[in-house]
Image (cartoon, rainbow, N blue to C red):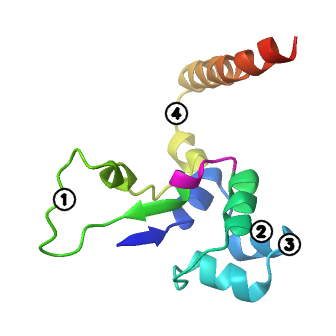
């Protein structure tokens, strides 16, 4: 079963009030509720695009797939890439008790990763 699974993204980003966040971003309270609680059977493409822009993610990050009971799908099938581990803690909570030297190393690694991600765009613009 394919499910819209936004909560882990909000948790990872440290957004404590996802519903309020979505409403402030222009979603109706009704849409925000249904999107957050997985109660929707269909999702508008413009909502997917808006969510990806807001949460800085790809459409595949928004969905998780759980096989039905007795469903035999080979691990090589593309849909199995949508199986994801649950993220139950924000990054802030994960690093809260790390020593400063480890925090500095993590910050440097993140900065390097961000710069690597920006490099191709900069080359195209030049």
Which badge, 1 or 3, comes first in the chain's sequence?
3
Residue 73 in the image: state x and y as whole percent: 19, 59
Q: Residues within 10 Å of mark 2 (few under 14, many from 20)?
A: some
Q: Where is mark 2, residue-wise?
A: 21
Chief secondary structure of the magenta portion = loop
> Is residue 96 on the magenta stretch?
no
Q: Position of residue 9 (x, y in %)?
A: 58, 57
Report the Cα–Cα distance between label 2 and label 4.
29 Å
Using a 10 Å C-alpha cutoff, classify the residue at mark 1 as few (fewer than 14 neighbours), some (14 to 19) or many (20 or more). few
Residue that label 1 marks? 73
Which of label 2 and label 4 is nearer to you?
2
**Frontmost residue, 89 versus 29:** 29
Q: Which residues are magenta?
A: 56-60
Which residue: 40% across, 57% down?
Answer: 86
Residue beneath disc 3: 26
Whether the magenta-drawn stretch holds residue 58 is answered as yes
Residue wearing tag 4: 98
Q: Quick one: label 3, few (<14), some, or many (20+) residues within 10 Å?
A: few
């Amino acid at each position: 079963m394919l499910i819209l699974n936004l909560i882990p993204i909000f948790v990872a980003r440290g957004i404590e009030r996802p519903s309020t966040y979505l409403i402030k971003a222009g979603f109706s309270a009704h849409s925000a509720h249904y999107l957050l609680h997985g109660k929707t059977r269909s999702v508008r493409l413009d909502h997917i695009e808006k969510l990806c822009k807001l949460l800085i993610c790809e459409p595949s990050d928004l969905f998780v797939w759980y096989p039905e009971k007795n469903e035999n799908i080979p691990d090589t099938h593309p849909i199995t890439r949508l199986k994801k581990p649950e993220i139950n803690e924000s990054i802030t909570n994960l690093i809260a008790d790390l020593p400063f030297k480890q925090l500095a190393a993590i910050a440097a690694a993140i900065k390097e990763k961000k710069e690597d991600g920006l490099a191709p765009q900069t080359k195209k613009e030049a």
